[in-house]
Every structure is written in C-alpha cells, then in structure tokens.
Image (spheres, helix red, strand yellow):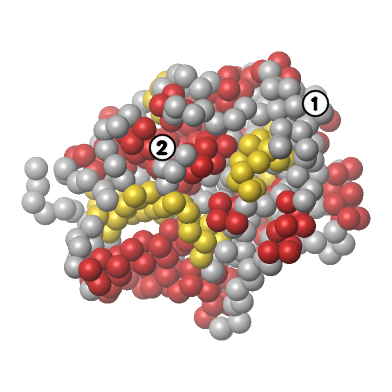
Amino acid sequence: MSTKIPYKIYLNEDEIPSQWYNVRADMKNKPAPLISPADGHVLTIEEMNPIFCEELNKQELDNDTAYFDIPGEVMDFYKMYRPSPLVRAYFLEKALDTPAKIYYKFEGNNTSGSHKLNSSIAQAYYAKKQGLKGVTTETGAGQWGTALSMACAYFNLDCKVYMVKVSYEQKPFRREVMRTYGATVTPSPSNTTKVGRKILSDHPGTSGSLGCAISEAVEVAVSNPGYRYVLGSVLNQVLLHQSIIGLETKKALDKYGIKPDILIGCAGGGSNLGGFASPFFGEVLRGEAQYKIIGVEPASCPSFTRGKYAYDFCDTGMICPLAKMYTLGSQFIPSANHAGGLRFHGISPILAQLYDDGYFEARAVEQSSVFEAATQFARTEGILPAPESSHAIRVAIDEALKCKASGEAKTIVFNLTGTGYFDLMAYQQYNDKTMTDVVPSDEAIMESLAKLPKIGNE
C-alpha cells in the first residue's frame, strides 16, 4: 500500500464494475410503490409498459435483486470514458488550511460533460433492444438532454427533448450540442402539447420547471407509437445505473485503504447523490460501516428540508403516476435561478425513504454561497464545476473548515458530476455581483402542498 496518495486514483479498465448495485435489496423499509392517481392501486408492470421501456420497468419494480449485470454493449460504451478518476484535492486543502483530506469523484470527463451518460446509454440500449423508434425526455440544465441525445445517436434512435424554458434561454450552447447529436429540442412549457398549453394558461410568463417538462415529454411519448419516455433522475432504475459512480469510488478508496468519514452529493431528483452514495448506504444498511452522508439542495427548491413526505405527482401537468417522496408539491415552480438540474419539486423515492429512516442528513444552501465555493474550487483545482455539483463543493468546504476549527483530520469525499462551461451566464452574474438569492416563503410552499393529491395521503 502506498504511503503517498496520488493526486488522481485511477482504476484499470478491467476494474470497471460489471454489475449495477440495487440498494433496495438491502433496505428493510422498501421505497413506497408507484400508484395510480385514479384510484390509488399499485401500478403493475403491464400498466407501466406503455410509458417506459419494458426491461427498464423490470428494473424499476425490483426490490430484491442486489446486482444487475451491465449489458456488454453498455460496458463497451462505458470504456470510452470510464473508469473516472477519484481526485485528491490537495490544492483546495492547502487553500483552506485544513487538516481534512478532501477527495472528489470527477464524472465530467466525457463529451456530455456529466454523469448523466451512465444512465442515458443504458436506457437507450434497452429502447433499441425493444425495437423502438425513439424516446422523449425532459432536461433542466441540459446535462441529461445532452447525454441522452448522444446515447440516441449511438443507437440510431430519434430523441425529442423538452428543455426547461429558463435553461433553454440561459444555455443556448447546451441546446446546440443536443441538436448536433440529432435531437429535437423544445422549450418547456410549450404550445406543442395539450398539457403545455394548459400550464401556460395557468401560469402566464412562467420560466418552466422540470415538472412541466416531464408532463410534455410523457404526453408526446404516449401519443406517438414506437416511442417511450425516459427520465434522467428520480426513478429507481436511474439510481441503479448511476451506482457505477459509487462502486468505482469505493474500489478506488479501498485500493489505498482510505475510509471516508463524510460523503456528500447534491440533491435534485436524486441521480447524483443516489448513484454516488448507494454502495455506502448498502454498507450501513448491512451493518458493515458508518458514514456521515449529506445531501445538498438549493434553498430555492428545498424538497428535503422544507417539503412533505407524501404521495405526489412527479410532473406539473399531473398526468404521471404518483410517487411517495419529499415534495414541495407538483404545482411548485422554483425561481429562475442557476441550479438548473436541481429545480425539481420532489426527490427519488429511494432517497426519500432512506432520509425518512434517518440514514443521511440534508442541507439547503443559497445560490451566491454556492458560486463562491465553485469559484474557489475553480481557482485551486483547475476545474470549472457545474452549478449543481457546486452545492456539494459548498458543504465539502464547510465541513473542511469545521475540521480546521476542531483540528480533526476527517476524510471528505464528494461527487463532482459535471463541468460548468455551459453555465457562464451564471458565473457572469456572480462575478458582476448581480446574482440574487431567492428563497420561497412558507406561504408559497404551503399553498403548493395544499394541492397534494388525496389518494395515498392521510
């Protein structure tokens, strides 16, 4: 075992995990099932097949299989950019003058610029295997839409993306990358769907949300033969595919005998935190280890810290199945800030159950403090981070400064799942000191929560 930890810990190509890990298999309290908004019955795989791909539905509903083999074609694609490095943030540690040891798993070393490719290539593979013509989806900051358009190009599938309007306008270059890969990109809410027209009527001038875009993408999928809807976060299947991040992280840490004390990921729909932390949650659930795990969300969209654990629609148009999650209400539309991929009213049912059972803590941080941390990270570590992942950087720095005050040399590991080169408008606002912090009022949240569906809730 080396006494000097290298700046970057790389696994060999043959060390890439060959299976995804399903944390539900180790959960005593399983995540609540998806239910019908009509009468509350638990949805069957036959009822879900017209919306999602058949093989993905099997993964979605499986609470017992601990490991799923990664298909050979997906593994071949992974090898183009995996394994991703685990990096020791020596320069950030020095700048903070902290005894803490800081590591980050960097998922931005691929053309899509984020971790989203891990699930998009899997979902595109299953769609192609089923013989579909194409898929529809939503995207917030554009990372998922970029990853899916790239995966669809690889498998020669049509790709229709509904992009949250504020991000469509703020990030035109991200949009153009999607179009370069052959995707059709529509700002949401739009006049191209029934649900989009209704949302525009109910919320004139809205900047959109992930919930709005989901509604439109689902409507288009179920209205066009040969299409299915795919999602970049929230769903059980997505956390399953993203577990490749946590599995690689654990392998890299074990390679040098490193035991983390604190694990941090940003929390929007759950793909970042869930994929990164799942194998570590598994150790805790099996009684093999203890970790302090932190999910970090924007104060402008605080599902964990100010939401309610209840059944709710995953979409603003209220056409999707009901999921039990921490939610601000499907009618909650966040402010037009720069946490694009985290602007979702709810959270993964898996993470919701784990949070409710006390397996991790959640923190909400404001936008300006997030960009302060992102700027410090860029200046010390040489990577311009995406706004979403920068929420994790903010709390990693906070925890490292606590170590400085206490003298404890804790080991902190966080997930850096994307680069911020398409987010320069946000950095410009921060640098120009025109960035503002918008925190929803209690009244606004209560008004939205009052509209929760009665079915499935007390």
The residue at the far top in this view is 46
Compare marks 2 and 1 and give the one earlier in the sequence. 1
Q: Which mark is residue 89?
A: none
| Residue type, numbered disc 2 | Ser
The location of residue 62, given as percent across then percent down, is 53, 21
> Residue 156, position in %: x, y?
63, 31
How far apart in space, not on screen, are marks 2 and 1 (Cα)?
32 Å
Label 1 is placed on what type of residue? Asp
Instruction: Kindly state the secondary structure of the residue where label 1 is placed.
Output: loop
Crowd band around label 2 with a 10 angstrom C-alpha radius: few (<14), some (14–19), many (20+): many
Residue where numbered disc 2 is placed? 278
Q: In the image, which is nearer the foreground, mark 2 or mark 1?
A: 1
Asked if labels 1 and 2 touch by Cβ distance under 8 angstroms, the answer is no
Identify the residue shown where x is 48% and y is 59%. Answer: 363
Q: Residue 342's quadrant in the figure?
A: bottom right
One can see residue 163 in this view: no
Mark 1 Cα-neighbour bin, 10 Å: few <14, some 14–19, many ≥20: few
The residue indicated by pointer 1 is 39
In this rendered view, identify the residue nearer to me: 293 or 160: 293
- Label 2 element class: helix
Residue at image x 44%, y 68%? 374
